Image (cartoon, rainbow, N blue to C red):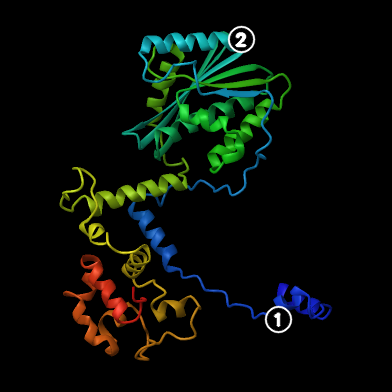
Amino acid sequence: MSLIILKVLLRYCTETDPSRKTAKNPVRTRLRSLGTWRETGKDKAYVCGLEDFPREKQVPVPDIPPWQVPETFTCCSKLGEGISKADAPEELKKAVEDTMKKLNKPDVEVFTDGSARDSVFFLGGGILVIEKEERHSLSIAAGRYGSSHRAESMALKKALSWLQEREKEDTINLYTESQSLVRRLEEGPTLTKTSLENEMWTLIHQICSRNATNLHIQWIPGYCGIAGNDEADHLANQGQIEDQREVEIDLKTAKAVSKRHVLDTIWAPQNVHESQPAGIRPPPTRDKEAGLSRRERVVLAQLCCNGKSPILQKYLYDIGASPCDACLQCGQSPDDLHHALYDCPEVDFFRSLIPGDPMESLWESPAQMIEFLRASQRLPIA
């Protein structure tokens, strides 16, 4: 439709009008999308145990404009000058108590905490609400996989959701152990990137939109003898054993789970390399690629992924970037990975550069494979 409009407007443009030149330019063919990567992603998600978990939605544009921060909302990631997490528990407890006394006397106090087994598995959140003489406690499941930071964020979001449903005009002080989370809130909604952060800011706006409602979020360190915080920590540990199957998993966590799967199943069985400490270590092929350029490493990675590389005519044809899939050197079709490594008669002489089987050399002898690709004119000569 836009092309038709351009052609119509072309009739009314003068010869010197830049729009006329633009309208005359040929329209590039849109490349086709191959379904193999989508299918591969689904297969790997199943192998990593992620297939059955609901996905957290992406937030390309936050719901809250970055310049709109409620006037009745404040937060603080510090206790006082010279106070840090490394201080003795007695000093931290005194600093927390002094900070709480300086804050406005609240109608409602909320303590939240999050925990994760081994910092990455079975996340739980704990919320303790103290309202005059009443106390409300809640344990929630925060995800099968994730991090302590995400568990803390899930607990804080649940607490904000509970406060929003109350629909009362109060002064509220909310305390959390996550200093990084409070620092993130201090930056405002400008850097909101995830659905979880977007939901927290939406709830903060809804709570503070009620007249005379003041909300303050304060960081307090854990394990320093603050009763409410210790109870929230106990509730978070209980949340770890809740049913995690209905908790959404975010993209960052899914990537981390996939990475750990690769480390455990592929890297860990390799021999320990001299330059790496014991534990997680890269495979020997990573060291063999040390002298290659980024472009050369990218090409090798593409070829290792079943030949999904633009140096092969078959791939260019599949995505619509080439009119045919025939080899530019010998004319045989299709010019796929097997043809380039084994069959093309025009490069038989250069196959002597490859030690052993060409397919295995993609992994074991990357430098020699790059020499072969240069000699066969699929890569420019350095």
Residue sitting farthest toward the front? 382
Q: Which residue is found at the position 45% from the left and 23% from the top?
A: 177
Q: Can residue 171 be seen in this view?
A: yes
Q: Which residue is found at the position 44% from the left and 8% from the top?
A: 94
Query: Disc 1 marks which residue?
Result: 24
> Is 123 or 13 nearer to us in this picture?
13
The residue type indicated by label 1 comes to Lys
Q: In this view, does 255 lie above or below 345?
A: above
Whole-percent x, y for residue 350 in the image: 23, 83
Query: Circle 1 — which element?
Result: helix
Whole-percent x, y for residue 260 in the image: 31, 47
Quarter placement of the C terminus: bottom left
Q: Is residue 115 above or below residue 371?
A: above
> Is 43 or 303 nearer to us in this picture?
303
Mark 2, Cα crowd under 10 Å, few <14 / some 14-19 / many 20+, is few
Sequence order check, earlier mark of 2 and 1: 1
Query: Circle 2 — which element?
Result: loop
Query: Disc 2 marks which residue?
Result: 105
